[in-house]
Image (cartoon, rainbow, N blue to C red):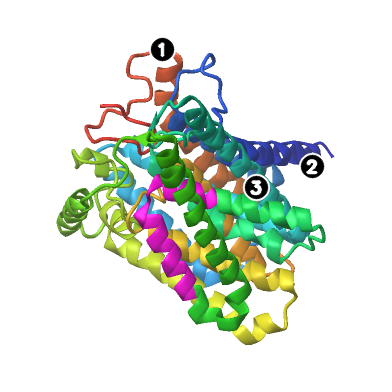
Amino acid sequence: MHRFTTSNILKFLVISFFIALIGISPSLKVIPQALVAMSLHDSQRLVELLLVSLVLLESIVLKTIAGSDPIGKVTRYAFSVLAAFAVISSYAAASPRHALIETSLFVGLAYLAAFVARLYHENGAQLVKRLTYILWGSILLSMIAFYVGYFTAITFKTPVVWPAPITGFNNIRFFNQYQLWTLGLLALPLLTIDVNSKRTRYCLHMGMIAWWVLLFHSASRGVLLSWIVGILITACIYRKLAWPFIRLQLMHITAGFLSYQILFELIPVLRGFAVVTGTVVRDTTSDRVALWGQSLRLIQEHPVLGIGPMQFAWHSHISAHPHNSVLQLATEFGLPAAALLLTITCYGLHCWLKRFNIARLQSQAHQDRYLAIALLFTAVTNATYSLVDGVIVMPISQVMMFTLIGLMIAFYAEGNVPETVTVKRKRLLHPIFTGIVLTTLVWSTLPEILQNAAGSDKRFSMGYTALGPRVWLEFK
């Protein structure tokens, strides 16, 4: 009985830290400055590490592997080979401890995906509804901060420096990653939940339009391009079935653009002053081209094992990552590992489209139909954006990515009873392996955490020369 009580407590803590990271940290600093000195990014990273550690601990206490059946034995073996490549590459890296941070963190995030899948199997409809509520609560907090800043600037004629009044992130592109994860999922209440009140539907529409204003203010070309790619691919795959979802997206982006023009172009002209000052849009992508060229050279020099997970910063003076997920995987983990992961991804996409084709979705309830469309749209848009930005690097993006993976796996396997391994040998090996991952994660990240807690001038600095962040925000 005590074991199950402990497990339930850990589950509650995992959900609490998830809400803290996804729901609160985009607008508020979760960890007080008086407790430990850190940037917004470092605060979010620390919450992510605590979240993943609790997931691993809950898995050890539970002593079962739930929801592994839909993955399949061959795919599990492929992931085992991938993990072996990551470990070998880590030990061959210039800084093995820092390489093991990345390896253990991604393995821990895979446990988070399994945790989400298990919650979906327990009550899928409630999980999706509550996740949607968390996202809506999160963006409302962000928008309150944004529009209070805007109307303060308008009222007192005190211009703000771009990207203000957007707050909560050390870099505006971190905000763009967070925002892109929400665009498809936020539309679900208007499609899948029976909202009878016209006032509620009106408020939801206005909220989505107001959310798009922030995207136009952030001036992210990458997010808009990724959104267009997501819309086109979703339309090509699901055609008329996707039209209600696409119509909402088109309506909200159009109204959002017009609202942005009124708020930041027309009203400032009528008021006779600029609301925002500072450079908004870059006129070059030469930094990306330089990083990608550097990645290709490193791949040529280290084709098999790569330079090691999270080691790009030790080889680059420009940035801590190449701003391209495929190049990052090939550069750091090696070509065989990158090819294996891409093969697994393509196989997963093939299985998804085979099961959730047009004929299958036509026979599904509205809730399941639009959930499948929204999940695919979200996966496509963020995969596209990861080709030009550090989507697989930032803490909120990492947690949202594996949450989405967990939802897609569970939704794919819905109707099948999740496999719970009860063989004695596997029951023994599972907590041992999980304990090794948890120990590695704590051991590899603890030095910088203690360094910051001690008040060192280095704070969370990891000692590399490139501009951060990767795990922590590196100030140069």
In magenta, the rendered stretch is: 211-233
Residue 82 image position (x, y, % from top left):
41, 59
Which amino acid type is marked by label 1?
A: Gly
Residue wearing tag 3: 136
Give the amino acid type for the residue marked by disc 2 in the picture: Phe
Per the image, the residue denoted by label 2 is 4
From the image, state whether disc 3 or disc 1 is nearer to you: 3
Q: Is residue 301 magenta?
A: no
Placement of the C terminus among the 4 image quadrants: top left
The quarter of the picture where residue 336 lies is bottom left
Q: Which residue is farthest bottom?
A: 359
* Residue sitting at x 81%, y 36%: 2
Residue 445 versus residue 156: which sits nearer the camera? 156
Question: Label 1 belongs to which residue?
Answer: 455
Crowding at mark 1 (Cα within 10 Å: few <14, some 14-19, many 20+): few
Q: Is residue 222 magenta?
A: yes
* Disc 3 residue crowd, few under 14, some 14–19, many 20+, Cα 10 Å: some
Q: Quadrant of residue 363?
A: bottom right
The numbered mark, 2 or 3, whose residue comes first in the sequence reads 2
Q: Residue at x 19, y 42 (%)?
A: 315
Q: Residue at x 20, y 48 (%)?
A: 287
Kindly check if marks 2 and 3 are in contact, taking CB atoms under 8 A apart as contact. Answer: no
